[in-house]
Amino acid sequence: MGAGAEFEAAAGTAAEDGAPGQEVLEQAAAAFGLLASPTRVQIVWILAAGECDVTGLAEQVGGSLPAVSQHLAKLRLAGLVRSRREGRRQVYLVDDPYLTAVVRLIVGRFAEDGTGAPSASTLAAVEGLARGRIV
């Protein structure tokens, strides 16, 4: 049996034991893949704080309108951000508290605070995820 077949067999067994199945793992990997871009992480970070249009996002991330629009299109197609019309403007938002918590957790983990200790927001995000609630 090859390594791929062993993994598939293990994934099938694990799924029966309550662990995520192969399809869920692939969806999660795809979402993480979309967040592999620093600009996309920054966009999600900004949108987690509130709605914004593409012009405001481009100004905040220091990118061009077409580049930010491309990032938003990919995030939207993956279901990581939403958009809605506000008059002639398209505004974007993140309304998934789990996505917000994960981004805060990961960014907070690598944020420099001078002591090497996790930030208060990182600790709150970890505690919230551990308790099954989002902070």
Image (cartoon, grey):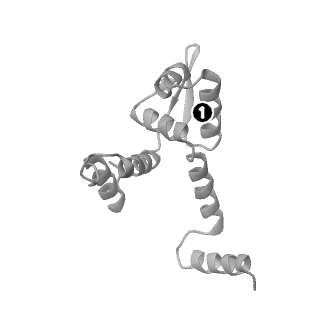
Q: Position of residue 97 (x, y in %)?
A: 42, 45
Outermost residue, top direction? 88
Q: Position of residue 65 (x, y in %)?
A: 60, 21
Residue drawn 66% across and 77% down? 7
Q: Quadrant of residue 9?
A: bottom right
Is 76 drawn above or below residue 99 in the view shown? above
Query: As rendered, which of 131 and 32 lies closer to the eye?
Result: 32
Say which element carries label 1.
helix
Residue drawn 59% across and 13% down? 88
Is 98 drawn above or below residue 86 in the view shown? below
Query: How many discs appear?
Result: 1
Q: Quadrant of the N terminus?
A: bottom right
Alpha-carbon neighbours of circle 1 within 10 Å: few (<14), some, or many (≥20)?
A: many
In this view of the protein, can residue 57 be seen by the observer?
Answer: yes
Residue drawn 33% across and 52% down? 125
Residue 15 horizontal side relative to residue 41, left or right: right
Inspect the image, locate mark 1, and give the three-letter code of the amino acid beneath it.
Leu
Residue on which the image places disc 1: 72
Q: Position of residue 112 (x, y in %)?
A: 32, 46
Q: Position of residue 90 (x, y in %)?
A: 57, 22
Is 37 drawn above or below residue 67 in the view shown? below
In this view of the protein, can residue 94 be seen by the observer?
Answer: no
